[in-house]
Image (tube, coloured by chain):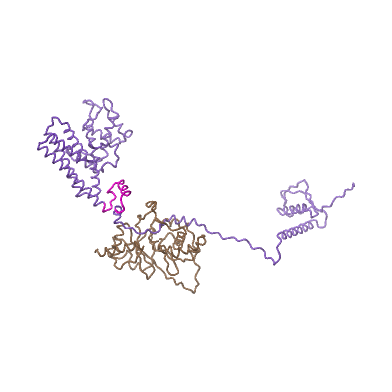
């Protein structure tokens, strides 16, 4: 590793910390060095692959068992989402994650109309629901919009394991989201078919190479691992 | 003595040195006396048993000492809590090494007392476990000062020997500090520094020097020895400062939170300026936290939203023609008229042109519960003042388990014709 690589890796980490997520550099040695530095600081570098034709995204996650929890933070907890926004995001999770036995991320695409209808049935303020779907949740990368459909965002991929486990346990308590009306048979959907994949950068395995999934594997749609609780690479 | 004497009972476990260091100190302490390298116990906790033996003798000893059985009882599970096998083994060793000796030097003597030298050894072991032997040097300096303060018939040779012993002790401790400054980690240096922080060698050495000058002015050998003692104290002080400097240099730079005690950190947090406090965060990196997400809280918030029930609207009023207001009682009168017609038709059907008719058979034919409904209708007709009919129910009861109506009175229905009083 040269000083130049270290410097660019430090810049990469700083950019991720400042903006939440960045596109990975072409030089994979920089990414590997950044993953190594992140591991030394108690974080994990994740590479998230978005819709076909778009660049992947780098984001910081937590190693298993190292995520902060409310016991550690006590009264220093960061602010949480408002209740209506939390409700909207929970319904997005329910719509994108109908089967809790599979991993939460990447989930299935869903339409905003389904979420708005479900929120209306629960008596939520329609203006706040629309604001959450169009502004608040995308700003926090909890959902992303692709065409007419919505997807779970990169922030959902970096949720700590205990949070995902709690959502999995309470999945049956989340309200059902009404299905979309069937499209007219003659009208084809213009939404692109998205294949989201992600891989964890492990410094011990990356010495100038890409993430642990092979290029051939990354070109295929992502399939959940057999062990659904394992955030496999 | 200037040092505060602590006992194991008063000192918390955190005041003691680490177990491995305690063992090393005791091994070094025993080295001048030991016959082989395994002379010291391997478990540092066993050394506390000697202190318990001292305490037991102080609290329970009779005039003629304590029997071995009584000692085992006072130290064992029902007493000080030591396991029986440990007590037996240690008592055997203490008796063999004359830490405990028989009250009377006879065969089969089972009463024991403590030998004072053993007490001195237990106290010394205690001090080694607390401060690693620094207290011995303090005691040595105090003893030399007391010797000089007597002031009469002082033997220059004895004083010279004491001064040289003090200098040797100071030099040994200073050299040990020097080695640790060169090789030890900040955490180890902190422990070493805290071991020495209750010492005041410079003040003790200065007082000794004044006493030597007062009593042996012009005695070159003694004055030289006193000067060398000051140099040794300065050497020790210099190494102590070097240790503190290394702690601050390395510990502060690496944000090692073991550098200061918790109380010192608290004091610094409350009293230090912004610039000093900022030094601790010089190498910290922080990123804006994402919104806090707790899975259980998300589920609870969503569950608190009850599904909205469909709104039930009031039914629309009946359509009326303009200018006509519906009479709410008109329908009631109409229904009442229909009911009157139904009853009149029923009565005429039953009477079939007769004035009176026995309808017991008709009730029997209808069976239960149609018979009951007919009977209720007839009673209503009887009570209706607009209808001229009445019903008579005989008192005798006909009971037939095989009949359609098993329990039935004879019932007569007919016109309620007014009776003519013939007497009038």
Please identify the residue farthest to the bottom as the structure is shown. Answer: A186
Residue at position x 79%, y 55% in the image: B387
**Could you tell me how many numbered marks the image carries?**
0
Q: State which quarter of the image contains the C terminus of chain A.
A: bottom left
The tint of chain B in the picture is purple
Q: Give the range drawn in magenta.
A: B252-275
Residue B407 vertical position relative to residue B159 in the rendered view, above or below: below
Q: Position of residue B169 (x, y in %)?
A: 17, 40
**Residue B15 falls in which quadrant of the image?**
top left
> Seen in the image, is B224 located left or right of residue B280?
left
**Residue A142 falls in which quadrant of the image?**
bottom left
Residue A169 belongs to the span the image colors magenta:
no
Q: State which quarter of the image contains the N terminus of chain A.
A: bottom left
Q: Which chain is brown?
A: A
Residue at position x 36%, y 55% in the image: A67
Of the pair B189 and A188, the residue shown nearer to us = B189
Residue B167 vertical position relative to residue A131 in the rendered view, above or below: above
Residue B293 vertical position relative to residue B262 in the rendered view, above or below: below
Q: Where is residue A28 in the image (x, y as percent from the top left)?
A: 29, 66
Of the pair B269 and B410, the residue shown nearer to us = B269
**Residue B120 falls in which quadrant of the image?**
top left
Residue B295 vertical position relative to residue B45 in the rendered view, above or below: below
Q: Position of residue A216 (x, y in %)?
A: 34, 68
Of the pair B34 and B170, the residue shown nearer to us = B170
Q: Where is residue B166 in the image (x, y as percent from the top left)?
A: 16, 38
């Amino acid at each position: 590793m040269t000083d130049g690589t270290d410097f660019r890796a430090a810049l990469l980490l700083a950019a991720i910390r400042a903006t939440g997520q960045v596109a990975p550099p072409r030089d994979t040695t920089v990414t590997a060095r950044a993953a190594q530095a992140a591991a030394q600081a108690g974080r994990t570098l994740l590479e998230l692959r978005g819709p076909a034709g778009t660049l992947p995204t780098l984001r910081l996650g937590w190693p298993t068992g190292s995520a902060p929890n409310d016991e550690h933070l006590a009264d220093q907890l960061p602010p949480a989402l408002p209740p209506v926004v939390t409700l909207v995001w929970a319904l997005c999770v329910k719509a994108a994650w109908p089967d809790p036995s599979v991993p939460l991320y990447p989930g299935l695409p869903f339409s905003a109309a389904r979420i708005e209808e479900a929120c209306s049935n629960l008596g939520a303020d329609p203006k706040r629901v629309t604001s959450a779907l169009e502004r608040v949740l995308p700003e926090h990368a909890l959902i992303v919009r692709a065409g007419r459909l919505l997807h779970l965002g990169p922030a959902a991929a970096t949720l700590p394991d205990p949070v995902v486990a709690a959502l999995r346990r309470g999945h049956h308590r989340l309200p059902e989201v009404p299905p979309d009306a069937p499209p007219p048979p003659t009208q084809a959907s213009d939404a692109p078919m998205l294949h989201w994949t992600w891989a964890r950068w492990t410094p011990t395995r990356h010495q100038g190479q890409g993430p642990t999934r092979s290029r051939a594997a990354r070109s295929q749609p992502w399939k959940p691992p057999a062990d659904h609780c394992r955030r496999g690479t | 003595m200037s040092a505060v004497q602590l006992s194991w009972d008063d000192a918390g476990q955190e005041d003691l040195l680490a177990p491995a260091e305690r063992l090393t100190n005791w091994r070094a302490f025993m080295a001048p006396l030991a016959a082989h390298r395994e002379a010291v116990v391997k478990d540092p906790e066993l050394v506390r048993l000697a202190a318990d033996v001292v305490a037991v003798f102080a609290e329970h000893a009779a005039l003629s000492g304590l029997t071995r059985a009584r000692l085992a009882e006072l130290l064992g599970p029902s007493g000080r809590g030591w396991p029986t096998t440990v007590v037996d083994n240690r008592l055997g060793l203490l008796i063999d090494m004359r830490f405990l000796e028989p009250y009377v030097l006879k065969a089969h003597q089972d009463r024991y007392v403590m030998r004072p030298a053993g007490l001195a050894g237990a106290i010394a072991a205690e001090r080694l476990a607390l401060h690693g032997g620094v207290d011995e040097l303090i005691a040595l300096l105090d003893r030399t000062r007391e010797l000089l303060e007597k002031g009469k018939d002082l033997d220059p040779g004895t004083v010279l020997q004491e001064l040289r012993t003090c200098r040797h002790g100071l030099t040994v401790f200073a050299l040990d500090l020097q080695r640790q400054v060169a090789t030890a980690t900040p955490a180890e240096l902190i422990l070493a520094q805290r071991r020495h922080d209750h010492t005041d060698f410079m003040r003790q050495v200065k007082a000794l020097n004044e006493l030597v000058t007062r009593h042996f002015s012009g005695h070159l050998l003694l004055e030289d020895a006193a000067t060398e003692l000051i140099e040794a104290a300065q050497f020790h002080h210099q190494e102590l400062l070097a240790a503190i400097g290394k702690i601050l240099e390395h510990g502060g730079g690496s944000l090692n939170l073991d550098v200061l005690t918790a109380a010192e950190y608290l004091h610094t947090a409350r009293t230090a300026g912004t610039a000093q406090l900022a030094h601790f965060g010089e190498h910290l990196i922080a990123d804006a936290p994402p919104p806090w997400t707790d899975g259980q809280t998300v589920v609870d918030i969503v569950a608190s939203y009850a599904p909205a029930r469909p709104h039930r609207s009031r039914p629309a009023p009946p359509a009326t023609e303009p200018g006509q207001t519906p009479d709410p009682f008109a329908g009631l009168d109409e229904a009442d008229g229909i009911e009157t017609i139904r009853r009149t038709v029923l009565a005429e059907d039953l009477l079939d042109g007769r004035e009176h008719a026995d309808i017991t058979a008709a009730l029997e034919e209808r069976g239960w519960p149609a018979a009951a409904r007919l009977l209720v209708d007839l009673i209503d007709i009887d009570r209706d003042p607009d209808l001229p009919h009445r019903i008579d129910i005989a008192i005798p009861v006909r009971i037939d388990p095989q009949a359609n109506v098993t329990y039935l009175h004879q019932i007569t229905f007919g016109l309620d014709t007014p009776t003519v009083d013939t007497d009038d």
